[in-house]
Image: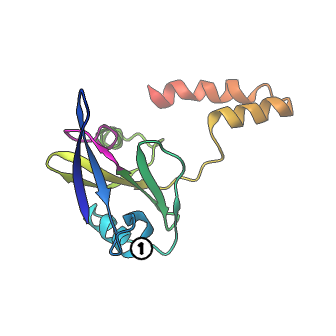
Amino acid sequence: ELGLVDVAFADASSTYLVALGAGGEDALDDRGALRRLLSLAGVQTPCAQVRPAGLDQTNSAVVVDETYVLKLYRRIEPGPGIEAELLQELERASFTSTPRLRGRLDHGGATLAIVTDYVAALGDGWDLTAAALRRGDWEWLPERAGRLRPATA
């Protein structure tokens, strides 16, 4: 079950996505509901392995079968999701340094969820830089920083 809930505050209102499994639990904790969400987004996978993708204050994301990341947007903004649109444009431009968008779930013109490739990381830039500096590898950061400009140009 997917529900859009409008919440009114003193000075504004917001719409939130609630995704529930068959027993009323979060859909990301129910393998059948998770398979259905992925299917609605255009992705078929058995959901044999599922784990949280990390901490996110506003969205929920899981790694599925070490192949995909499903991200549910919990606070729904009107219009197409910026992240999905950006990933599509980067793919059209043959940019290969971001995960590929594999599917999306839209409703009423708003993006509710996206599915991307899962890309295993060695860590974030800060941790990798700090580790290199602890090793005394002073060239690690300049070598990689030099790659940023052409990759993001």
Q: Which residue lies furthest to the front in this view?
A: 10
Q: Which residue is drawn at 34% across and 48% down?
A: 74
Q: Quadrant of residue 44?
A: bottom left
Q: Which residue is drawn at 39% across and 63% down?
A: 26
Q: Which of 77 and 45 is in front in this view?
A: 77
Q: Nearer the viewer, residue 68 or 2?
A: 2
**The N terminus: image quadrant:** bottom left
Q: Residue at x 40, y 50 (%)?
A: 100
Q: Where is residue 104 in the image (x, y as percent from the top left)?
A: 28, 54
Q: Does the magenta stretch include residue 148?
A: no
Q: Does the magenta stretch include residue 81?
A: yes
Read off the residue under disc 1: 31
Q: Residue furthest left?
A: 108
- Local packing at callout 1 (Cα closer than 10 Å; few below 14, some 14-19, many 20+) is some
Q: In which quarter of the image is residue 90?
A: top left
Q: Position of residue 110 (x, y in %)?
A: 20, 45
**The C terminus: image quadrant:** top left
Q: Is mark 1 on a helix, strand or loop?
A: helix
Residue range in magenta is 73-84
Q: Which of 131 and 60 is in front in this view?
A: 60
Q: Position of residue 33 (x, y in %)?
A: 34, 71
The image shows residue 139, relative to residue 101, as above or below, that is above
The image shows residue 110, relative to residue 23, as above or below, that is above
Q: Quadrant of residue 27?
A: bottom left
Q: Is residue 31 left or right of residue 128?
A: left
Q: Nearer the viewer, residue 122 or 55?
A: 55
The three-letter amino acid code for the residue at tag 1 is Arg
The image shows residue 1, relative to residue 59, as above or below, that is below
Q: In this view, does 80 lie to the left or right of 92?
A: left
